[in-house]
Amino acid sequence: MFHPNYINPKKLITNDDILYLFKLVETHGGVLRFVGGVVRDAIAGYNRTDIDLVTDLSPSEFSDMCDEEDIRCVPIGIQFFTLGVIIRSSFFKVTCLSTDEDSSQDEWKKDAAKRDLTINAVYADEQGNVFDYFDGIKDLENGVIKFIGTPSKTIEKDPIRIMRFFRFCAMFGKKIDKKSLKSCIENKHLLQKVSQEKIKEELFKIIMAPYAARALDLVFKYGVLDFLIAPPKDIKNLEKLDNIVSALGLEKNIIRRIFVLFEPTAKRAERLASIFRLNKEQKAYLLDLCRAKVTVKNFKDSVSINKIIYQYGKEICRDLCLCLNLNNSNIDEIKQILNTVDSSKKLEFPLTGSDLIKIGANKKFLSLYMDVLKKEWFEHGCMDNKEELLEKFRIIFKYGV
């Protein structure tokens, strides 16, 4: 189905290098189109940086064009007739429809039929004209995620498409295509043959998506990933967190989302870090969240908040505030707590052993004096300054000088 001037070209053409490539292909008798994610996201109103292109020129014709125009062209997926093109500072991935020197008009639909989902089989030219062979636009507008052709056959060609189905349900899904979902469930065993790295990558994207809770509910309800990961304790917690984060205008954070979703012990956090391919810093942060002994009561006033900031740092306290207030509908109260955390000064114990020695403290008991004063300082919300602590030393240890 042809949709003239459907997309604003500015959403597709992000620099002059893309436009230059379109003109070159046209000059050499070919057609070049955007496809997949860049078209889908432009229609849905999302910004996208990576671009996939398709041409009806054969690989040899396209390579010859690049040679004539002194453009660097490298093969990056020969089995799929995919070439990488470098124009000035830009890199583009271009797939050729076929190896045939003469491509028929049906080649575009044949190419679309090879793709996984209807919403990913929509093409566009540089003028914003859209070519939709399987009603992908209609499905996108209705929030229906649907496989192209016979779902089971589409999945058999590449089982990772099961995870992609759930990922796009998490991105755009409002309605469930029962036929596609049924095929995912019936063929879930095929995922055990897929690289775990690919599965983890898709799972990561699902958890960060707008409707993650809805998609994950299906994934775990039907045991799609039972071979890899145990179900979360309460998937609704992720939706609650989303509502709070959205209301406060905060950015999503993968560690915070994993923590809320799985409520892990430190031992399980180690396993989750592997499943989600967390880097060293992310893993350490997840473990810090798991080990922090904090409850809602620790946020009752500035003194209590100062104590946990001193113990765990501001970032941990901010995230724990959000995670522990999932059932708190008073957004203003949560915001006020976060403001208190943010406005808290850097907490460092202001006293040194040298300060005590200067007023005549017995060096033999210096370690004892410091331990007692630190505890006193902590119990008072880390508010006392050096002078106040020296005065407390004189009172507590009046025989120590």
Image (cartoon, rainbow, N blue to C red):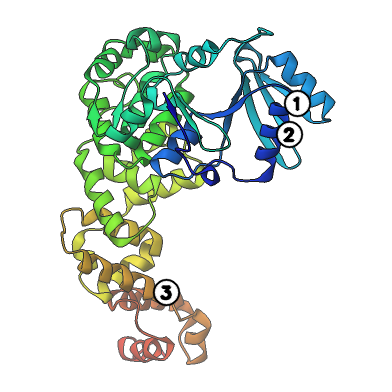
Q: Is residue 378 above or below residue 176?
A: below
Whichever of callouts 2 and 1 sits on the residue coming sooner in the sequence is 1
Q: Position of residue 190 (x, y in %)?
A: 37, 11
Q: Amino acid at mark 2?
A: Ile
Disc 1: which residue: 73
Quadrant of residue 74 within the rendered picture: top right
The quarter of the rendered structure image containing the N terminus is: top left
Disc 2 versus disc 1: distance between alpha carbons? 7 Å
Q: Earlier in the sequence, mark 3 or mark 1?
A: 1
Quarter residue 33 falls in: top right
Residue that numbered label 3 is attached to: 347
> Is 298 above or below relative to 237?
below
Mark 1: which amino acid? Cys
Q: Position of residue 361 (x, y in %)?
A: 45, 87
> In front of the other: label 3 or label 1?
1
Rendered residue at 15%/59% (across/down): 329
Question: How many numbered tags mark residues here?
Answer: 3
Give yes or no for contact between labels 2 and 3 (Cβ–Cβ under 8 Å): no
What is the quadrant of residue 349 in the picture? bottom left
| Label 2 packing within 10 angstroms: few (<14), some (14-19), many (20+) | some
Give the residue displayed 44% in from the left and 43% down from the top.
283
Q: Secondary structure at mark 2?
A: strand
| Residue type for callout 3 | Leu
* x, y percent for residue 97: 59, 15
Task: Give the residue at mark 2.
Answer: 86
Q: Residues under labels 2 and 3: Cα distance?
A: 51 Å
